[in-house]
Amino acid sequence: MLGINSLLVPLEVSLEPNLPKALSLTVQPNFILNDDNDTAQVNLVLVPNAETGVIADGTPITLTINEGTTNRDVELVTTNGAVSYSLKSTYDGFISLSASASNYSVGAGVSSTDELTDALSINGRGTVVYENNTLKAGSIFYLLLKNLTNRVFIIEQINAGYLDPNNNNAFVNFPDSPITASAFISNGDLTAGESTYIGYELESDVEASQFVISYLLYDSQSDSTFRFNSTFNFAQ
């Protein structure tokens, strides 16, 4: 019986070093105001097969922007393997982004709203004695503020006080308020995903039912200040 013998020949596969092997998409910030002026920078990068590879200038990338029921395509071309797009919008809601190039695709998103306060969440707690329309001395309030986005805000001050029922609910600061000490305002910066915490204890009785902690923040991108308030209402 005759057999056929063959030699094993090693094969070496070499990828074209200048062709893409991946596509990346990043967005900064991932939260914008829907005033058709505020901007998110969409950054797209094609990664070559080899470290020494070079993506050809003019390589096309299609960026698809979905705003609810509306889709629009933006045709971009790379320089040194990268390209950026400035996204503005009047849409209220989540904007879905997808990019495709050379059989690769990637996605991300941006929240678009008319209020900077939508970028934040707040959680309040309290150990409180409330009797006869009076907040009693020793009552303690806690507040946790979190930045839900990668947009950076500056905490300028924190006001702690109450709404005076004998003066049309005018706001009255407690002693030591406003609070501007660095240790209490997260060193001034509320960075991406960061949380900050504050507590306040009443030193004396206060004839009031509504206690307020108010953050005054600055947004450098829109060059504006805004307040984020939390009210504890013990009359309800």
Image (spheres, rainbow, N blue to C red):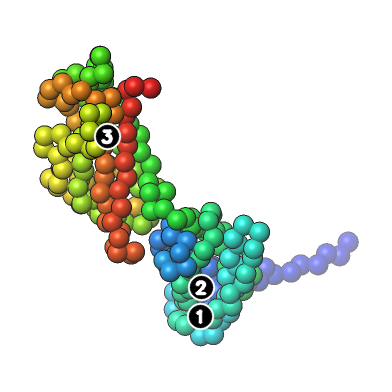
Q: Residue at x 30, y 48 (%)?
A: 227
Residue 147, horizontal then vertical, whole percent: 35, 47
- Residue mark closest to the camera, 2 vs 1: 1
Type of amino acid under label 3: Asn
Label 2 crowd (10 A; few <14 / some 14-19 / many >=20): many
Residue holding disc 1: 78
Quadrant of res 104? bottom right
Secondary structure, mark 2, is: strand
Type of amino acid under label 1: Thr
Give how far apart the Cα atoms at labels 2 and 3 are. 61 Å
Q: Residue at x 55, y 74 (%)?
A: 20
Q: Is residue 98 visible to us here?
A: no
Residue holding disc 2: 46
Residue holding disc 3: 168
Residue 112, horizontal then vertical, whole percent: 48, 57
**For the residues bearing labels 3 and 1, Cβ distance under 8 angstroms:** no
* Mark identifier at residue 199: none
Label 3 crowd (10 A; few <14 / some 14-19 / many >=20): few
